[in-house]
Image (cartoon, coloured by chain):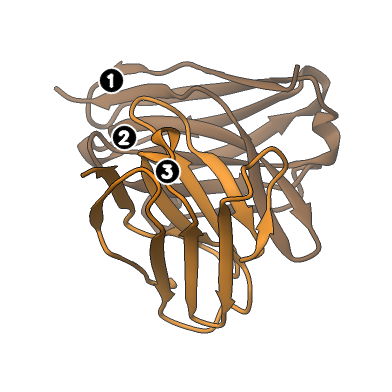
Chain colours: A orange, B brown
Amino acid sequence: AIQMTQSPSSLSASVGDRVIIICRTSQDIRSDLGWFQQKPGKAPKVLISAATTLQSGVPSRFSGSGSGSEFTLTISSLQPDDFATYYCLQDYSYPFTFGPGTKVDIK
Amino acid sequence: EVQLVESGGGLVQPGGSLRLSCAASGFNFNNHWMTWVRQAPGKGLEWVANIKEDGSAKYYVDSVKGRFTISIENARNSLYLQMNSLRTEDTAVYYCARDTRSGSHDVFDIWGQGTMVTVSS
């Protein structure tokens, strides 16, 4: 199975900060990567698919980049609603695998 | 409204069985792959299984192969997960999600609220 890592595992940031989360995979997955946001007690929500495609209804402050084995999720200006845990997911090959998550909390 | 609603979770002893259901509404269920994802208490997300819209293809994470079976019933707009030989490590919230395929990409774009499965003696 493809192994996933995310960095950092957690971060503290202030409203208005630029936040960057990195996801690395154990092999080349082209652009077959998605990003999800999850708040406590809630189901995950997809933010980005195919590494860079912003899903409908997701604010434009979220963006994704990368291909191959290194990907980034960028939040250009952190908003109060963005404090959550973020996961990457590779859909390149079975079994699909999620990253371990990055928790973003308030500084 | 596009919606997925899971049911069937509960407390079961190790070695026991449970069948989860996921009822879909508001979209053409017959046109979508579907998936199950789980989350153990305080832990991250784990993809469990998915199934093609006509049931002709199914894929599983290694830890559940031979114990769990994913299935669909298009006439009822329903997805199922039959879980046998349950272990304590299967304890988790189980989510169903719609898998909207775009080219080679899988997008889990609609999620249910989750159903809790607890495996304990």
Q: Pointer 1 and pointer 2: residues touching (CB < 8 Å)? A: yes
Q: Amino acid at mark 3?
A: Arg
Q: Distance from label 1 to label 2 (Cα)? A: 8 Å
In this view of the protein, which residue sits in the foreground, B35 or B101? Answer: B101
Residue matched to label 3: B67
Marks 1 and 2 belong to one chain: yes
Residue matched to label 2: B86
In this view of the protein, which residue sits in the foreground, A52 or B12? Answer: A52
Residue matched to label 1: B12
Q: Pointer 1 and pointer 3: residues touching (CB < 8 Å)? A: no
How many numbered marks does the figure carry? 3
Name above or below for residue B110 compared with residue A19. Answer: above
- Mark 1, other Cα within 10 Å: few <14 / some 14–19 / many ≥20: some
Q: Amino acid at mark 1?
A: Val
- Mark 2, other Cα within 10 Å: few <14 / some 14–19 / many ≥20: many
Q: Position of residue A40 (x, y in %)?
A: 33, 29
Q: Distance from label 1 to label 3 (Cα)? A: 15 Å
SS assignment at label 1: strand
SS assignment at label 2: loop
Q: Position of residue A53 (x, y in %)?
A: 69, 59
Q: Position of residue A45 (x, y in %)?
A: 54, 38
Q: Distance from label 2 to label 3 (Cα)? A: 8 Å
